[in-house]
Image: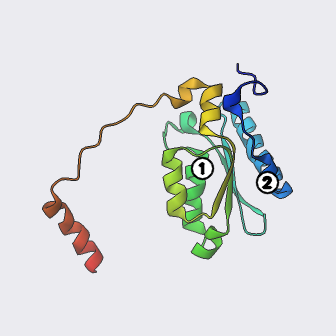
Amino acid sequence: MTDPGTDPSLSPDSSALLAPADEDLLRRAIALAARAVELGDAPYGSLLAGPDGTVLAEAHNTVRRDDDITAHPELKLARWAARELDAPTAARTTMYTSCEPCGMCGGGIVRSGLGRVVYALSTGQLVALHPASGAWPVVPRVGPALLGEARAPVEAYYRR
């Protein structure tokens, strides 16, 4: 295992930029990740804190348990926020998470309207600790294509 005290890929640390309340909530997200490991799940935990700092919801990774590649805590909480919070409240809500959200979760966070994300480990730091975490293939994308056909249902929907 890499020694975080000597491995430059595991720094810098932005803790100096965090308020004490942010540190407390981020530690709670890390504790959720530790609890996930105790339960046999992957080591990722997240929570949502409302504008006043109250914890609104918590989740941990259940990808293996649920046999669901989307069962990341960040995506679960983004979906919860989109369903349960009005837009002004969501915009003032912060997600605290043990690791930087992946691309899938990042998209959900943006679409949910959450206003801020505070994370402990960056993706680079995670990969330095566990290289397989960064071993995702690049999937080729081909397009755009068939604009004339593809635009018809979109235009019909938005004309309503």
Q: Residue at x 86, y 55 (%)?
A: 20
In the rendered view, would you say 73 is above or below 49?
above
What is the x, y in percent for residue 91?
62, 69
The three-letter code of the residue at mark 2 reads Leu
* Mark 2 closeness class: few <14, some 14–19, many ≥20 residues within 10 Å: few
In the rendered view, would you say 143 is above or below 4?
below
The residue indicated by pointer 2 is 18
The C terminus sits in image quarter: bottom left
What separation in Å lies between label 2 and label 1 (alpha carbons)? 20 Å
Front in this rendered view, residue 122 or 45: 122
Give SS at disc 1.
helix
What is the x, y in percent for residue 98?
69, 43
Q: Residue at x 57, y 73 (%)?
A: 87
* Mark 1 closeness class: few <14, some 14–19, many ≥20 residues within 10 Å: many
Is residue 2 visible in this depiction of the protein? yes
On residue 10, the disc is: none
Q: Residue at x 72, y 39 (%)?
A: 12
Q: Residue at x 71, y 21 (%)?
A: 2
Quarter residue 113 falls in: bottom right
The three-letter code of the residue at mark 1 reads Glu
In the rendered view, would you say 64 is above or below 108?
above
Left or right of 106, for residue 52: right
The residue indicated by pointer 1 is 74
What is the x, y in percent for residue 122?
64, 40
In the rendered view, would you say 132 is above or below 151?
above
